[in-house]
Image: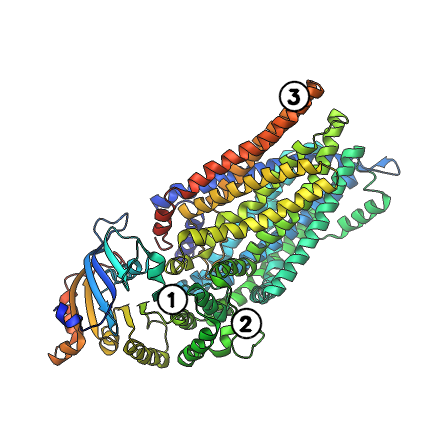
């Protein structure tokens, strides 16, 4: 299945343009991501589906500038991640699967740090934090050092930090892991509203049901190669079970730990 | 038993360079470097300890020597200090194993009983303490007995026996202290003003001890005797302390072959009791931590609402560096305490070295050469904090790569932060040396320039080396507790360069002295030229090393790879 170019471009600006991305780790015998192309548009939520080691996280790490890649082009809101990295990075917020935060800071200091990194004004910071705290409910614990936080709390503060500058593009690696069901549900709703406000979201997952529930589009990646890219509404209209379809497309073998 | 051995083997393999083929050579290199440095430290210690031993044993009270009493006092106090030191390292080891090491969380889900995990961990702590004890006891005993002319097969054999059993005593004390220590550590780590206050207190204590120790050595150099320091009253206090510092005095008795049967009997009983205490206490804490966790609630000041501070993009990165260092006691101590103490250390060392050289060459002035040598040497030793500037960000360095900062912005802020601390330290040292008359104001300016150039060169080299070969922390708090090859290389290279330049300066000064006043003037100019041009050339080389392929290497930086 493939989303056609005509379907994609209904006066919406692309937030990510990936063309022929190839990433091979120095010690690896084969590329972890091979000839991967993808375009995401404003207002879209795109789910990157794949087994462990399929290349989802590697793709996201290439998009965010964490990992260098061998060939291809990645543009964020029109800015090339290689030639204009700072301009490109100003336009997205990233939440890693490791919930990497400066553990020596308090939650509030971390959010303050992220706000200053993106040049957010003090007044905007206040109003946005009030709004984000309504979603993540960390409250007074934001004044405690992150080293005291639980896994889930770190995930929350990571998300808050990545959203403080209202990025046009929100990139998340396995976002729902570690969140309690209530927060998970709130985040799903927030994602929808955030995308409807003209932003776009891309996240990786191997949880088919969360992708089905939240996303507009799903991209299946297997052994580093994009196998499918489809609109979930069309898919549901055809009355096909996504999980079965996903498993049928990726069933031959699951390369444990080859990339990610 | 098989699982216990498996767990113990895992810890041994983690600690020694027997890992993967790739990491083996890298680890082996850092072990060799660290071993060279440790061997150097032991050699210097043995030399000083030997001199001090022979001087102390000759002390007379009311002009009457009592070598046997002096031997007993000396060994008792030495063992007491060693027991205290082993207690401190034991607290650190227990704290890391029980609370900071995240592998308990993984092992608990595997088919190992809590007893097997506990036994293997306690055994591993004991092995590490025993190795440390063996190194210290052998160094102290062999140096002491050789100097005192008492070396025998009995001493060597008993040194091994004592080294193997002695660690049980400090481990028992450490097991009692570990909980209060962990609680205090958590509080101090969570409140950086408190952390700063504690650090300042430690610093003041360190400065006082340092000044006192140098005072003793200076008097020894001036008078050639320690008698003025160790008068009748002091010796009486030392004698009383030696008699009461149980069980250190018992160990001293065994080593000096005095009341061997009685002393060994008491020591065996004490060691058995200590082992029982250690096992019971550590077992209780371990089971609690592994089954329920040990989440102390650390009280925090609750602010009303949220307060933001706009620091700007550069200030933001500087603040991040500051917070990371300030809230990690070991980094904070490495940065601020050693950097602030450096001027004091330089002052006392320069004063002592001046006394020594005046004794050798009469009233000849080596002020500039000596002060420059000492300042660059101490600055290079205190500057080692920059050799972990990349690694200490831990996995956050990956997220940092997604932030809108260029590699040069991130790295330059790290160097500015390190540089500010280092430059302040060098400046205070130079002002102190000039103000105390150990070198002229003009000479102090050249010393400052020379040390500054070398410090910047060292920082650029260390930062790039850390970027090329980062050693990210294994613990959850992101603190680097393991020694790594970058630190060893920076210390070793720094020392070699400083010794070479220092010796060149002194040799030049000595050579020009023989040639008369004209040669002395030319020699001084040459000294200035060496002091500035060599560091300048090193800075050029270091900057070239820093900038070559910088963007590519930063892009390839992978904490997970």
Q: Is the residue marked by circle 2 packed among few (<14), some (14-19), or many (20+) residues within 10 Å?
A: few
Examine the rendered structure and indicate whether residue B332 appears above or below residue B434.
below
Tag 2, which secondary structure? loop
- In the rendered view, does B331 fall on the left or right side of B104? right
Depth check, front residue: A226 or B57: A226
C-alpha span from label 2 to label 3 = 65 Å
Of helix, strand and loop, which one carries label 1? Answer: loop
Name the chain letter of the residue that bears numbered label 2: B
Q: Residue furthest front?
A: A11
Position of A83 relative to A227 (above/below): above
Quadrant of residue B526 in the image? top right
The image shows residue B110 at horizontal and vertical percentages of 37, 64
Mark 2 lies on residue = B296
Q: Nearer the viewer, mark 3 or mark 1?
A: 3
- Mark nearest the camera among 2 and 3 is 3
Q: Quadrant of residue B214?
A: top right
Residue with the mark numbered 1: B109
Which residue matches tag 3?
A: B511
Q: How much space separates mark 1 and mark 2, taking CA atoms?
A: 23 Å
Closer to the observer: label 1 or label 2?
Answer: 2
Of B476 and B169, nearer the camera is: B476
Image height check: is A164 above or below A58? below
Sequence-wise, which precedes: disc 2 or disc 3? 2
Name the residue located 34 percent from the left edge and 65 percent from the top edge.
A91
Label 1 or label 2, whichever comes before in sequence order: 1
Residues flagged by tags 2 and 3 on a common chain: yes
Residue B144 appearing in the image: no
Please state the chain letter of the residue tagged with numbered disc 1 in the rendered image: B
Image mark for residue A163 = none
Dot 3: few (<14), some (14–19), or many (≥20) neighbours within 10 Å?
A: some
- According to the image, what is the colour scheme of the structure? rainbow
Left or right of B66 on screen, residue B261: left
């Amino acid at each position: 299945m493939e989303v056609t170019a005509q379907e994609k471009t209904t006066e919406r600006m692309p937030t990510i343009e990936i063309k022929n991305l190839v990433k091979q780790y120095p010690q690896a015998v084969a590329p972890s991501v091979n000839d991967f192309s993808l375009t995401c548009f404003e207002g879209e939520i795109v789910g990157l589906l794949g087994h462990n080691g399929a290349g989802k996280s590697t793709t996201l790490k290439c998009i965010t500038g964490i990992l260098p890649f061998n060939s291809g082009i990645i543009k964020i809101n029109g800015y090339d991640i290689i030639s204009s990295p700072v301009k490109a990075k100003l336009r997205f917020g990233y939440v890693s699967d490791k919930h990497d935060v400066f553990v020596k800071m308090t939650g509030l200091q971390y959010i303050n740090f992220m706000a200053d990194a993106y040049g957010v004004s003090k007044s905007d910071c206040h109003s946005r934090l009030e709004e984000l705290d309504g979603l993540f409910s960390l409250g007074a614990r934001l004044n405690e050092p992150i080293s005291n936080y639980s896994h889930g709390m770190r995930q929350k503060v990571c998300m808050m930090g990545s959203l403080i500058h209202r990025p046009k593009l929100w990139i998340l690696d396995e976002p729902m892991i570690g969140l309690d069901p209530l927060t998970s549900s709130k985040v799903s709703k927030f994602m929808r509203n955030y995308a409807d406000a003209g932003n776009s979201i891309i996240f990786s997952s191997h949880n088919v049901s969360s992708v089905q529930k939240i996303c507009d589009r799903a991209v299946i990646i297997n052994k580093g190669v994009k196998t499918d890219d489809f609109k979930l509404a069309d898919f549901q209209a055809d009355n096909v079970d996504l999980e079965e379809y996903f498993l049928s497309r990726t069933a031959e073998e699951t390369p444990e730990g080859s990339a990610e | 038993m098989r699982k216990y051995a498996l767990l113990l083997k895992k810890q041994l393999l983690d600690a020694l360079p027997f890992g993967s083929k790739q990491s083996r050579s890298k680890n082996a290199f850092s072990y060799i470097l660290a071993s060279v440095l440790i061997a150097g430290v032991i050699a210097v210690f043995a030399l000083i300890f030997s001199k001090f031993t022979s001087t102390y044993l000759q002390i007379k009270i009311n002009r009457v020597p009592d070598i046997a009493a002096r031997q007993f006092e000396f060994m008792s106090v030495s063992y007491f200090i060693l027991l205290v030191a082993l207690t401190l390292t034991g607290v650190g080891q227990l704290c890391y194993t029980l609370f900071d090491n995240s592998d308990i969380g993984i092992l608990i889900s595997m088919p190992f009983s809590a007893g097997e995990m506990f036994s293997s961990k306690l055994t591993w702590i004991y092995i590490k303490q025993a190795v440390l004890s063996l190194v210290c006891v052998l160094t102290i005993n062999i140096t002491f007995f050789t100097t005192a002319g008492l070396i025998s097969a009995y001493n060597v054999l008993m040194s091994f026996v004592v080294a193997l059993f002695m660690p049980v005593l400090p481990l028992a004390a450490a097991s009692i202290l570990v909980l209060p220590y962990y609680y205090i550590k958590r509080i101090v780590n969570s409140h950086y003003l408190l952390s700063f206050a504690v650090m300042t207190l430690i610093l003041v204590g360190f400065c006082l001890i340092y000044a006192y120790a140098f005072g003793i050595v200076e008097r020894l150099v001036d008078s050639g005797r320690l008698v003025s320091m160790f008068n009748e009253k002091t010796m009486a206090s030392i004698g009383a302390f030696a008699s009461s510092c149980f069980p250190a005095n018992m160990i001293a008795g065994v080593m000096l072959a005095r009341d061997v049967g009685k002393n060994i009997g008491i020591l065996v009983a004490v060691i058995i009791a200590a082992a029982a205490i250690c096992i019971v206490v550590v077992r209780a804490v371990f089971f609690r931590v592994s089954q329920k966790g040990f989440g102390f609630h650390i009280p925090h000041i609750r602010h009303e609402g949220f307060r933001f501070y706009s620091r700007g993009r550069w200030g933001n990165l500087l603040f991040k560096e500051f917070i990371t260092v300030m809230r990690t006691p070991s980094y904070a101590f490495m940065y601020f305490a050693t950097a602030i103490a450096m001027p004091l250390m330089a002052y006392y060392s320069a004063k002592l070295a001046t006394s020594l050289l005046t004794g050798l060459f009469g009233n000849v002035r080596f002020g500039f050469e000596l002060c420059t040598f000492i300042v660059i040497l101490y600055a290079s030793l205190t500057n080692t904090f920059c050799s972990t500037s990349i690694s200490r960000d831990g996995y956050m360095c990956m997220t940092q790569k997604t932030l809108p900062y260029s590699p040069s912005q991130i790295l330059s802020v790290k160097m500015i932060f390190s540089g500010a601390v280092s430059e302040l330290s060098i400046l205070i040292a130079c002002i102190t040396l000039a103000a105390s008359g150990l070198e002229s104001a003009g000479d102090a300016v050249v010393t400052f320039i020379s040390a500054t150039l070398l410090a910047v060169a060292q920082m650029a080299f260390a930062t790039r080396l850390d970027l090329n070969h980062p050693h990210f922390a294994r613990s959850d708090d992101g603190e680097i507790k393991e020694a790594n090859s970058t630190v060893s290389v920076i210390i070793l290279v720094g020392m070699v360069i400083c010794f070479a330049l220092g010796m060149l300066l002194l040799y030049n000064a000595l050579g020009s002295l023989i040639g008369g006043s004209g040669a002395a003037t030319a020699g001084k100019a040459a000294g200035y030229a060496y002091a500035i041009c060599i560091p300048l050339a090193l800075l050029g080389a270091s900057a070239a090393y820093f900038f070559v392929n910088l963007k590519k290497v930063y892009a390839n930086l992978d904490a997970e790879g």
